[in-house]
Amino acid sequence: MALTDITRAQIEMLDLVPDSPLIAVDADEVLVYFMRHFRDFSAEKSWRLNPGAGRLDQALTHIEDGSIADMATGLGLIDAFFQAEVHNQIAIDWAASSLKEASLSAQIVVLTNLPHAARDGRIANLGGHGIPYPVVTNTGGKGFALAELATRVDGPVLFIDDSAAQIESAAKEAPHVRRMQLIGCDYAAPALPRTDAAETLALDWGEGQRWIKRVLG
């Protein structure tokens, strides 16, 4: 899936410094907790989350009748979650301070997959956690958005995401972008697949911060 017009417009509105490094960082499970919060939200709606199922249409079981949610139901729950709870997501330890230090030598953009209508809520939530960087909302693989971002800077571009699929999308569509898989949620970490398309894997922001320093010198 190529860039949507909405994502492209958000990228075009960014005030990027051409000769400065750029860090594009995901939000859910990297800056804020998602899966354990979504687990509790789903339970309130009578769905039990199995984080190890691998696919959304296999991960939700109805608490009362044992039926498995189809993809439409799962996506509907996620949309409902972001509509109701994006303002309440809790920050992952050391994310804000690590990005604040990184911002001394690089510009930062949050590249996040969530409904475009939830963008303002995400901006407000992250800002309240001391993460006041521009937010670009995306649909599908992030590689196209990264490739577009990379055309706007001459310095190195770094990409940080918890999703193996998104790291692989970056490797395919923007192979020159440096890639780290960072899974900041201890609940999600055992369930999320790893990928060799990442230069390194980090399970907390201490490791993540050290990688950023090595790459940026």
Image: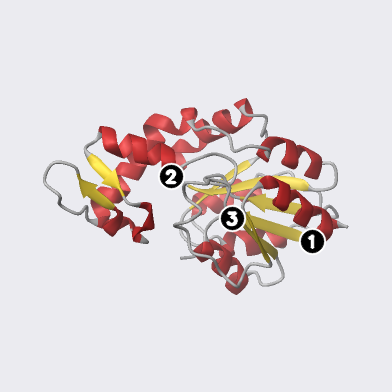
Residue at 41% in and 31% down? 85
| Closer to the camera in the image, 141 or 7 | 141
| Closer to the camera in the image, 87 or 118 | 87
The label on residue 35 is 2
Residue linked to disc 3: 161
| Closer to the camera in the image, 208 or 139 | 208
Q: Nearer the viewer, mark 2 or mark 1?
A: 2
Please say whether residue 133 is visible from this viewpoint: no
Question: Label 3 amino acid?
Answer: Asp
| Circle 3: element type | strand
Task: Judge from the rendering whether residue 142 lies leftward or rightward of residue 80; answer left or right.
Answer: right
How far separated are the C-alphas under marks 3 and 2?
14 Å
| Circle 2: element type | helix
Vertical position of residue 125 compared to residue 168: above or below: above
The label on residue 156 is 1
Question: Label 2 amino acid?
Answer: Met
| Residue 58, percent from left and from top | 27, 58
Residue at 37% in and 30% down? 84
Closer to the chain start, of discs 3 and 1, is 1
| Residue 201, percent from left and from top | 64, 61
Q: Nearer the viewer, mark 3 or mark 2?
A: 2
Residue at 58% in and 49% down? 26
Task: Judge from the rendering whether residue 122 lies leftward or rightward of residue 80; answer left or right.
Answer: right
- Among the 4 quarters of the image, the one containing residue 131: top right
Question: Label 1 amino acid?
Answer: Pro
How far separated are the C-alphas under marks 3 and 1?
17 Å
Quarter of the figure with the C terminus:
bottom right
